Image (cartoon, rainbow, N blue to C red):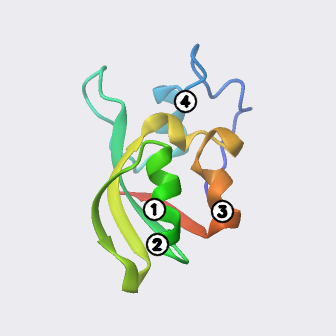
């Protein structure tokens, strides 16, 4: 998982969501939505067991668009706020089999 160069307090906006400027710095390859109202990004998530991790991700706002469990990945829309470090983001799912998150 990626780590932010700034403290978690500095990386969040006023409502506790990750600030877009900080996300652009931490994830330079991430294509951020051009609309100020857009709140999610398309990502590929890799996992040890995709089927087991999917409901947990969906509870955090992930919308599955494609899944290939035999290759250990799924793609979909993830709320930008879930890219926050630590327990506020999906990084906290690493002990449950999350292997990685990449912008698509």
Distance in Å between CA atoms under marks 4 and 3: 19 Å
Q: Secondary structure at mark 1?
A: helix
Q: Relative to residue 3, is residue 38 drawn left or right? A: left
| Residue at image coords 34%, 43% | 41
Q: Which mark is residue 50?
A: 2
Q: Relative to residue 96, is residue 17 drawn left or right? A: left
Which residue is tagged 4? Answer: 18
| Residue at image coords 72%, 25% | 9
Q: Quadrant of the C terminus?
A: bottom left
| Residue at image coords 50%, 43% | 60
Q: CB of mark 1 within 8 Å of CB of mark 2?
A: yes
Distance in Å between CA atoms under marks 2 and 4: 25 Å
Distance in Å between CA atoms under marks 3 and 1: 13 Å
Can residue 101 be seen? Answer: yes
Which percent across, then down, holds residue 91? 63, 52
Which percent across, then down, holds residue 6? 70, 34
Which tag, 3 or 1, sits closer to the chain's start?
1
Distance in Å between CA atoms under marks 1 and 2: 6 Å
Q: CB of mark 2 within 8 Å of CB of mark 3?
A: no
Count of numbered badges drawn on the protein: 4
- Please tell me which residue lies in front, 33 or 74: 74
Which percent across, then down, holds residue 68? 32, 77
Which residue is tagged 1? Answer: 54
Q: Which mark is residue 94?
A: 3
Q: Relative to residue 85, is residue 76 drawn left or right? A: left
């Amino acid at each position: 998982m990626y780590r932010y160069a700034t403290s978690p307090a500095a990386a969040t906006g006023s409502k506790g969501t990750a600030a877009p400027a900080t996300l652009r710095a931490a994830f330079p390859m991430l294509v951020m939505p051009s609309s100020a109202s857009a709140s999610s990004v398309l990502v590929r998530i890799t996992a040890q067991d995709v089927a087991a991790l999917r409901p947990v991700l969906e509870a955090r706002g992930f919308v599955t668009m494609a899944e290939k469990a035999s290759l250990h990945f799924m793609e979909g829309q993830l709320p930008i706020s879930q890219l926050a470090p630590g327990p506020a983001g999906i990084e906290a799912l690493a002990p449950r089999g999350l292997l990685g998150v990449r912008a698509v």
